[in-house]
């Protein structure tokens, strides 16, 4: 399982607000099976099989084009660990455990 951070930025919109486009991308995530996600102020973290996650990101990347945008910049960071199960919650829990131990 992979944990992937994605940020999709439409360029050249009529307004500096991007929430309309973010909402459209999140709607795609909500309808996608086999992935979970967490929206944050600067992007979205998606968890699931890497191939499935990348398929969903491609659909999200296409969304602003369907709304008339002519340029989209998408940034993707992938954490794909193969030696043990990797989850969003597990990554956060590992850091919190270190903090409790005093690092």
Image (spheres, rainbow, N blue to C red):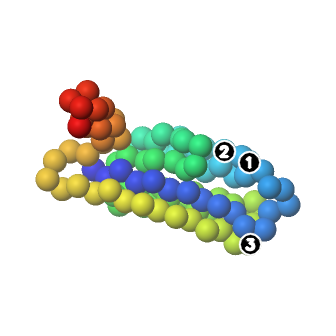
Looking at the image, the residue that sits furthest to the left is: 83
The label shown at residue 83 is none
Residue at image mark 2: 23
Contact between labelled residues 1 and 2, with CB atoms less than 8 Å apart: yes
Q: Residues within 10 Å of mark 2 (few under 14, many from 20)?
A: few
Residue at image mark 3: 70
Looking at the image, the residue that sits furthest to the bottom is: 70
Looking at marks 3 and 2 on the same chain, the residue that comes earlier in the sequence is marked by 2
* Relative image position of residue 57 (x, y in whole percent): 50, 59
Circle 3 SS class: loop
* Relative image position of residue 93 (x, y in whole percent): 29, 33
Between 95 and 8, the one nearer to me in the picture: 95
* Relative image position of residue 6 (x, y in whole percent): 50, 56
The label shown at residue 20 is 1
Spatial CA distance of label 2 from label 1 is 5 Å
Looking at marks 1 and 3 on the same chain, the residue that comes earlier in the sequence is marked by 1
Q: Based on the displayed image, in which of its 4 quarters is residue 67 positioned?
A: bottom right
Report the side of 29 relative to 92 (left or right). right
Between 50 and 87, the one nearer to me in the picture: 87
Residue located 35% across and 41% down the image: 88
């Amino acid at each position: 399982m992979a944990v992937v951070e994605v940020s999709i930025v439409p360029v050249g919109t009529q307004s500096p607000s991007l929430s309309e486009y973010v909402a459209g991308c999140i709607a795609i995530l909500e309808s996608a099976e086999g992935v979970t996600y967490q929206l944050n102020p600067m992007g979205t973290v998606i968890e699931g099989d890497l191939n499935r996650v990348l398929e969903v990101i491609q659909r999200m990347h296409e969304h602003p084009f369907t709304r008339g945008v002519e340029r989209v910049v998408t940034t993707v960071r992938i954490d794909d660990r193969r030696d043990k199960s990797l989850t969003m919650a597990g990554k956060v829990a590992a850091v919190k455990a270190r903090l409790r131990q005093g690092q």
